[in-house]
Image (cartoon, rainbow, N blue to C red):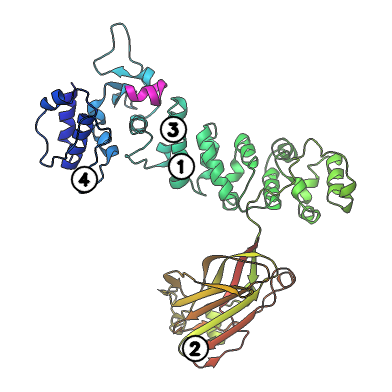
Amino acid sequence: MLAVWFQSLLQITTAVEKTAIYLIFHASAEQGQTFRQSIYSLPSVKPHYKMGERLIPLSQNFPKVDWLAIKYKTMDMVADCVIKVVNEDKTVTEVRALISDLVIGSRCLLDLAAPISGMPNGKKCELIDDVEANVIKLAVEFIHLNGNLLSEVDNLDTCLELVRVAVEFEILGLGPFCVELLLNKFLSVQNIWSVFNSNYEYIFTAAACLKFLATKTKDCLQNESFHDLDEIPFRLFLSLKKMADVSEIELVSKILQISERKTDPRTFFRNYCLQKLRLLALKADDFSNLRQLFSYLSQEELRYLTIYTSPLKCCLKTLPPPTFCSNASERTTNKRLRTLTFVPEGDIQSPKDIFRAGNWFEPKGNLEFSLELRTKKCVKLTGFEIFCELDLEKEFLDDSREAENYTCNLQGEYSVSVFKESFCRKIEFPAKLEKDGWVFVAHCVIVPAGARLTLRLRIERPRFLRNLLASPDFQEHENTFFEPPKISVKTDEGDLTNDYCILKKISYSEM
């Protein structure tokens, strides 16, 4: 029987794989000489080996053998049982499997499997009638390939069905595998709430959704489907300990908006939201923007919050009300993203207005822009927005076409200097830019307190540029994070006014 299987295996493998399979069988067979005489001759390439050695080194000329692919190709050949699945048209599909695989991978599927030779007299084979045959095939393949899949899971519904099969049939390792599939391939801001709402009872789907929500909270909250979330997934979401990009004040504001849409807003807020929101993490100024919250709280809760957010907090000896979450820390994992604005939105004209007012210029040759910032606190720069060239040719021709894309003509670098030490890095720009607008260039760098950040940008032979002056608002930033900036602009014809700016804003967060 073993020799027949061995010959079948060799029929579908390459010469290299044949040699590797031959070595395994001969190195593991106790009666090596007898077994060797029972099969046909070796492939033309015959490696040397000694019986009894545990490891037989292959020559470096042999490429790596894909054992998963070999196991996948021979899966149906070596099967000794079948799992019968009823299709929608009442036909039955037989999914072939190995009993030895099911013993380890899923005892539940093992109980449903029938020997290929047929059931014993008086016994009937149980059928699976609530799962598609292709999903069961994927599950059996996952077990047979030791926690891997070579077949593609090509849609979200199939992946969700795999999760259900993993839970209901207790398939070892399939649940965590599906979590990674959902996170890396199928979950998005557009479908996250619908997936969570309809599949939260399956622990692996719920885990994948909550992990996704924890990393993209802000974008997900802007999706209107959030308003239709059922009560249980709603409470699960509010139980998240960390949310990447949403502060507690933003979260509370969003929850208040949803509560107002309910039939009984106060009951909904108190039953499903109050104990999950970290009201003790808010500042006194935050409550001025949450006036609707006061109508949902009791007199005792309001009194406690009033004292807790006042200078008398140090005299407060009573515990928070039992309806409050006792955790007073922010759940956001990122510091609040801030912006240093060089050109306010109100100063940015449309291309048509720029053309009519003549508020543009075309420098001769190249333009070099330099910005120097000295920090007062340690900050993390995440990127900057830079203005692109103007498409004034369509304004000359009074053309209504869309603005054109053009090849990026930007180069740049930044340097950070601390005392006598400094380092410099190049900046990567997008390959294409769109005229008439601006582009965000993501670039991450940490600048220590007291360091000097110098940003140098070079535009090669620009055409039409906006004639903009830098007018940063330093009411907050000047006293807290940065010294006033130093800007210089040079062209081949000489220096421009130091107020001229090609940057729209810089994004950063406090470390």
- In terms of secondary structure, where does tag 3 sit? loop
Tell me whether the residue at label 2 lies in contact with that at label 4, contact meaning CB atoms closer than 8 angstroms: no
Report x, y in % for residue 141: 33, 32
Q: Which residue is drawn at 46% across and 69% down?
A: 428
- Camera-near label (2 vs 1) is 1
Judged by its main secondary structure, the magenta piece is helix
Which span is picked out in magenta? 100-109
Tell me whether the residue at label 3 lies in contact with that at label 1, contact meaning CB atoms closer than 8 angstroms: no
Q: First in sequence: mark 2 or mark 1?
A: 1
Label 4 sits on residue: 59
- In terms of secondary structure, where does tag 1 sit? helix
Label 1 sits on residue: 180
Q: First in sequence: mark 2 or mark 3?
A: 3
Circle 3 Cα neighbour tier, 10 Å, few/some/many (<14 / 14–19 / ≥20): some
- In terms of secondary structure, where does tag 2 sit? loop
Disc 4 residue type?
Ser
Q: Distance between the residues labelled 4 and 1?
A: 37 Å
Vertical order, 263 against 395 (above or below):
above
Q: Distance between the residues labelled 3 and 1?
A: 11 Å
Q: First in sequence: mark 3 or mark 1?
A: 3
Q: How far apart are marks 2 and 1 (CA)?
A: 52 Å
Report x, y in % for residue 446: 60, 65
- Camera-near label (4 vs 3) is 4
Circle 2 Cα neighbour tier, 10 Å, few/some/many (<14 / 14–19 / ≥20): some
Q: Which of the 4 image quadrants contains residue 161?
A: top left
Q: Distance between the residues labelled 2 and 3?
A: 63 Å
Label 3 sits on residue: 173
Q: Distance between the residues labelled 4 and 3?
A: 35 Å
Vertical order, 196 against 282 (above or below):
above
In the rendered view, does 472 fall on the left or right side of 2?
right
